[in-house]
Image: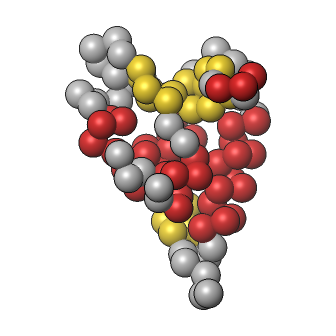
Amino acid sequence: MPAKPITLGPLHFDRRGDAVVHLRTMLHRYDVGDRVNADDALVLRAALENHPNAVVKIGCGVTHFSVRSADYGTKCFWVNRPDGTTEKFSITESIHGS
């Protein structure tokens, strides 16, 4: 199966697997409770827009991204919306689809 390239904001990856590795590395630079910086937020926004449930995940908009606890003691990226609601999203689904 040939590699499928993907562009996430300012970054281009020749293989989607490389994009997943990049996003996981990004996630591990942050502690639970941290707000994602502006440069990383550009990449996350592009990844989120690629998510199969992007419309639901984005909802009324995105004010910023943060890192919070997820299932089974893990952590993940969360979308923070203008209305105060939040939604977690999967890196893998954002890159590979559901």
Q: Is residue 38 above or below residue 2?
A: above
Q: Nearer the viewer, residue 66 or 42?
A: 66
Where does residue 85 sit, x and y in percent of width and height? 36, 16
Residue at the top extreme, as displayed:
84
Whether residue 97 appears in this view of the structure is yes
Residue lying at the far left of the rendered structure: 60
Residue 1: give x, y in percent of width and height.
62, 87
Q: Is residue 43 left or right of residue 26?
A: left
Furthest residue to the bottom? 2
> Can I make out residue 46 in this image?
no
92 relative position to 32: left or right: left
Rendered residue at 30%/37% (across/down):
56
Q: Position of residue 12 (x, y in %)?
A: 55, 68
Q: Looking at the picture, tell me which residue is in the foreground, 21 or 63.
A: 21
Q: Position of residue 33 (x, y in %)?
A: 64, 15
Total of numbered circles in the picture? 0
Residue 10 higher or lower than 70, as above or below: below
Q: Is residue 97 above or below residue 29?
A: below
Instruction: Write the residue at 34% across / 22% down.
Output: 81
**Residue at 72% across, 55% down:** 21
Front in this rendered view, residue 92 or 24: 92
Coloration mode: secondary structure
